[in-house]
Amino acid sequence: MTSAPLRFGLLGTGYWARVTHAPALTSTEGITLAAVWGRNANAAAELAAGYGATAYSDVSQLLAAVDAVAFAIAPDVQAPIAVRAARAGKHLLLEKPVALSRAEADALADAVRQARVASVVFFTHRFVPDVRAWLADVADRGAWAGGVFDWLASALLEPSPYNTPWRRDKGALWDLGPHVISLMWAALGPVTSVTADAGPADVAHLVLHHQGGPTSMATLTGSAGAAAAGVEAYLWGDSGRSAAPLGGTDAVTALRIALAELAANARSGRTGHPCDVWFGRDVGRVIGEAQRQIEQRQIGQR
């Protein structure tokens, strides 16, 4: 007997919602895009109409009409709505970072725990098949001493569709940092502490200390020019180097995988996932500590 499709509500109508979330939600088996909400009612109506969904101007009404919610909105807007959704018994497909403060992330994680709903945070690379194969390979080989992750993006330059207010405010540390920490955590083990400093513009430098001794280093910016833009990551150790296959990521395919895994957990009653809300909360704590250190250094330099 085939289960009824899991009805999803999409919160958000911006670029990422249009090019990634809506296409993935309407092309993943066992899932249907049933509802759309956005702070811009006209944009919500237009997006919903394009996929045969219903637009809602009230979040409570949307929650009453769905089984799960996919978020494509700024993290400061996501966190309180996600708490409401969890308390209403809705499963959560969250964006990173899950929140911008430790208190909000803790409140969300606690709401998910109490409601016993399934949750997945869309750390894009963690759902890319080639990257998953790479993570399995480096785990089998083991004995890595460290890693390097450089992500020089142009998201904060004027032509970019990702040049949004929250990214301009929080910079690459909060936008790209969760992806970096998530991948290095999976490759080298849990992050036990971080050392952070800042460069010009929104450049952030991180040294991640992993359980058992390995360290990884990262340089992040969303303000790199086109000539410098690029992303690369590798592990190193006695057996040499192993580069992560990060080029040409298909975000829609990756999100389909995340949605399918969330739906499987929702149907089986499981709440845990390698990229669940608790992992998202822990990644956010690393980012928050890095931000604290950078701010302290900036105060000392005045």
Image (cartoon, rainbow, N blue to C red):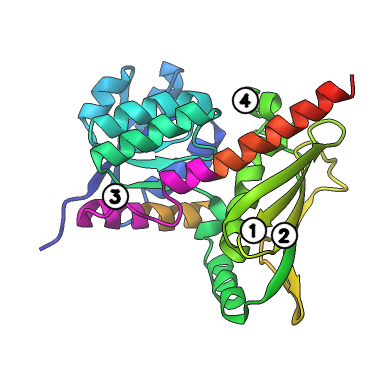
How many residues crowd around disc 2 within 10 Å: few (fewer than 14), some, or many (20 or more)? many
Residues shaded magenta: 260-282
Q: Which amino acid, by three-letter code, is at mark 2? A: Thr
Reading the image, the residue beneath label 1 is 210
Of marks 3 and 2, the one in the foreground: 2
Task: Give the residue drawn at x 80%, y 38%.
Answer: 197
- Label pair 1/4, CB-CB below 8 angstroms: no
Q: Which amino acid, by three-letter code, is at mark 3? A: Ile
Label 1 element class: strand
Of marks 3 and 4, the one in the foreground: 4
- Label pair 2/1, CB-CB below 8 angstroms: yes
Residue 31 numbered tag: 3
Depicted 131 relative to depicted 157: above or below: below
Depicted 251 relative to depicted 87: above or below: below
Task: Give the residue drawn at x 48%, y 34%.
Answer: 72
Residue 215 numbered tag: 2
- 92 in magenta: no
